[in-house]
Amino acid sequence: MIELAGRLDAQNLRFGIVLARFNSRVTERLLAGALDALSRHGASEDAITVARVPGAFELAQALRALAAGKTPPDALLGLAALVRGETPHFDHLAAVVTRALDRVAADTRIAVANGVLTCESTEQALDRSGGKGGNKGFEAAMSAIEMAQLLRQLPGR
């Protein structure tokens, strides 16, 4: 039996982070968490590119652009915060963004971490971006590191 697993070592890995500006009170905290995780696990500051986009809908387009660059990153992170409102817009946007991130991963064969919060309230989003619910940006970065390391081991990469 061959067993493969990614390790939490960000040294010698490049990262592309796309951050939605909408709900910036939350998303800036997600970014801080992601950068903290990457730093703690050995990523150098010059190996991290952060691109800011208007909102969650634009994440996938910017992630694709980073992936198509001259030196593509080993992992991509999409960070945004969707908060339910009074219309069904939240449900549609959450589904479209999730599918788009999945599509970027499938098309680019680069690790893509989904750090998009889908919350019922701003309070819940703040809790999940550094409050009592932890920091989902930190968690997304951890997933990105592990998946980038795993993908280096898998055939067809």
Image (tube, helix red, strand yellow):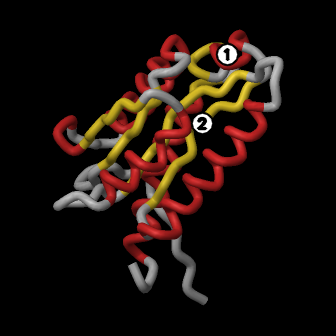
Characterize the local packing of mark 2: few (<14), some (14-19) or many (20 or more) Cα atoms within 10 angstroms. Answer: many
Q: Secondary structure at mark 1?
A: helix
| The quadrant where residue 3 appears | bottom right
Characterize the local packing of mark 1: few (<14), some (14-19) or many (20 or more) Cα atoms within 10 angstroms. Answer: some
What count of labels does the image hold?
2
| Amino acid found under the numbered disc labelled 1 | Asp
- Looking at marks 2 and 1 on the same chain, the residue that comes earlier in the sequence is marked by 2
For this rendering, which residue is in front, 106 or 12? 106
For this rendering, which residue is in front, 110 or 143? 110
**Could you tell me which residue is drawn at 36 percent across and 51 percent down?**
9
From the image, tell me which residue sits under label 1: 127
Q: CA distance from mark 2 to mark 1?
A: 14 Å
**Could you tell me which residue is drawn at 78 percent across and 37 percent down?**
91
Image quarter in which the N terminus is found: bottom right
Work out whether 139 lies above or below 3. Answer: above
Work out whether 13 lies above or below 57. Answer: below
Picture coordinates of residue 109 (x, y %)? 44, 70
From the image, tell me which residue sits under label 2: 116
Work out whether 123 lies above or below 115. Answer: above
**Could you tell me which residue is drawn at 76 percent across and 23 percent down?**
84
